[in-house]
Image (tube, rainbow, N blue to C red):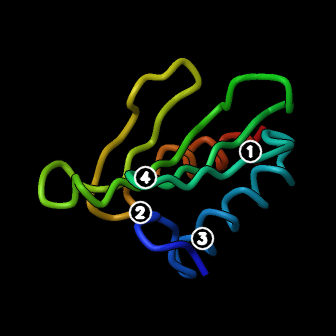
Amino acid sequence: MQPAGQVGFERGELTRILDLYGRMVAAGEWRDYAMDFTRDHAAFAAFRRAAERPQARIEKRPSLRSRQGMWTLIGEHGQVLRRGHELAGVLAPLERRLLRAVED
C-alpha cells in the first residue's frame, strides 16, 4: 500500500518490468536494481554493478499521460531513449538488446 499522493507501479506493470529484469540478469547484463517512489513519478533503475550509474531507468510520470505519454526509458548517460503511452513500447529497445545478448 502506497501513501496518498505517491506514484507507484501497478501489479501488472511491475510484473512486466521485473520479468524483463530477471531475463537481463540471466543474460548477464544486469546485477542490481533500485526503485524510487515520489509524489511526481515512480522509477525503476537497473544496474550492471551496484556502484555505477543505472544502465537503464524506467519512469512513470502520470502528469505526462495526456502529452507524450507517462512512460519514459532513460539511458545510462541520462538521455531519453523512448517515451510512450504503453509500457511495452517503451521497453522494446531493452527487449531487442536482450535478444542480441542471447544470440551472442
- For badge 1, the amino acid type reads Glu
Q: What secondary structure is marked by label 3?
A: helix
Query: Can you give x and y, in whole percent of width and height, for residue 70 in the image?
Result: 30, 56
Q: Which mark is residue 103?
A: 1
Of callouts 2 and 1, the N-terminal one: 2
The furthest residue to the front: 4
Viewport quadrant of the N terminus: bottom right
Compared with residue 69, is residue 11 higher up or lower down, i.e. above or below? below
Q: Residue at x 85, y 32 (%)?
A: 50
Residue drawn at x 51%, y 48% as measured from the top left: 58
The reply to whether dot 3 and dot 4 touch (C-beta < 8 Å) is no
Disc 3 from disc 4: Cα separation: 14 Å
Q: Secondary structure at mark 2?
A: helix
Q: Which mark is residue 6?
A: none
Between 2 and 63, the residue placed more toward the observer is 2
Q: Earlier in the sequence, mark 4 or mark 2?
A: 4
How much space separates mark 4 and mark 2, taking CA atoms?
Answer: 14 Å
**Residue 41 bears which disc, if any?**
4
**What residue would you read off at disc 3?**
14
Amino acid bearing label 2: Leu
Percent from the top left, x then y, of residue 95? Answer: 57, 52
| Label 1 to label 4: alpha-carbon separation | 35 Å
Q: Is residue 1 above or below residue 67?
A: below
The first of marks 3 and 4 along the sequence is 3
Mark 2 and mark 3 in contact? Answer it, CB < 8 Å: no
Q: State the mark number for residue 87.
A: 2
- The answer to which of marks 2 and 3 sits earlier in the sequence is 3
Determine the CA span between mark 1 and mark 3.
26 Å
**SS class, disc 1:** helix
In contact (CB < 8 Å): disc 2 and disc 1: no
Q: Quadrant of residue 2?
A: bottom right
**Mark 1 vs mark 3: which is more N-terminal?**
3
